[in-house]
Image (cartoon, rainbow, N blue to C red):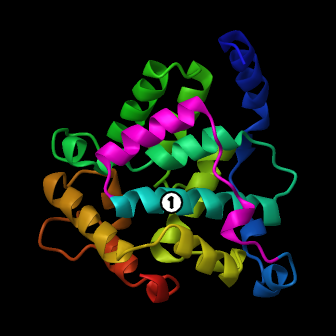
Amino acid sequence: MDNSSRVKQFAARRLREFKPRLGTKLAMEQQEVLDGPVHQAEDFPIPESVLVNDVTTFVKKELDEQTFNHSNRVYIYGVALTKTHFPHWSYDLETYYLACLLHDIGTAERYLSTTKLSFEFKGAIVARDLLLQLGGVEDQADSVCDAIVRHQDIFVKGGNITMIGQILQLATILDNVGLRANLIHSRLIETTTAAFPRKGWSEHFARVVESELRLKPWCHTSTFEVPNWREGVESNFARDVRGNSVMKPFD
């Protein structure tokens, strides 16, 4: 596909990917999942393209294995969530996967301690620049950038968000603290963690949270904390990550 066709393709999807925040639809009974299809990780293959390969090479160089595996689990959980509960949603799988691969790039060693920007914001900038440098379409790069900026806006009430951004939010918080794990079947968690092992992800990410809070007490992650959080006060977010009882058997 030439660049002109890709631009038209993503422009056409732009409006389709814009969705309001999810409301009571997420308050589902466990039975809805149990009565539905039992998905496994292999049902959601990773998108393949030159751009995906190039970004994967970059990410593997910059991030540790735990974070890379987390990014892939987020992709699988996100696609499974939409297929199960929002089958009418139409979005670009490659764009979502790129957002997943890059959503935590701001936690890489070369970025986390070298900027005053919160890791989501720095990571979003790095991701956008990278995609454009690799020949990606600006509309796609913008979609990935916006989703990464907002992927920890868990406490924002009201307003709208892109579909890619909403799915990324749901899937990351599910993998990190187990929130809304009732929306996916336990078999999916078992097969996904087998394909992309957690390797102590809960403790690993909790330490990343604590590290950024020490480095940048003003960071966006502080929205998870008590008002006027300061160093020396236990991190609510890190505690919740460590206390992820859903994923504990797989850590």
Q: Nearer the viewer, residue 71 or 194?
A: 194
Q: Is residue 45 visible?
A: yes
Q: Residue furthest top?
A: 4
Q: Quadrant of the C terminus?
A: bottom left
Residue 22, located in which quarter of the rendered image?
bottom right
Q: Is residue 56 above or below residue 237?
A: above
19 left or right of 208 in image: right
Where is residue 138 drawn, in percent x and y? 56, 20
Q: Residue at x 68, y 81 (%)?
A: 187
Which residues, given as a range, are shown in magenta?
Answer: 38-64
Where is residue 142 drawn, in percent x and y? 54, 28
- Residue that numbered label 1 is attached to: 154
Residue 95, located in which quarter of the rendered image?
top right
Where is residue 107 drawn, in percent x and y? 30, 51
Q: Is residue 251 above or below residue 25?
A: below
Q: Nearer the viewer, residue 149 or 129?
A: 129
Residue 213, located in which quarter of the rendered image?
bottom left
Question: What secondary structure is found at the residue carrying circle 1?
Answer: loop
As for residue 42 lying within the magenta part, the answer is yes
Q: Nearer the viewer, residue 101 or 32?
A: 101
Where is residue 133 drawn, in percent x and y? 43, 20
134 left or right of 125 in image: right
Q: Residue furthest left?
A: 232
Q: Is residue 161 visible?
A: no
Q: Residue at x 20, y 42 (%)?
A: 110
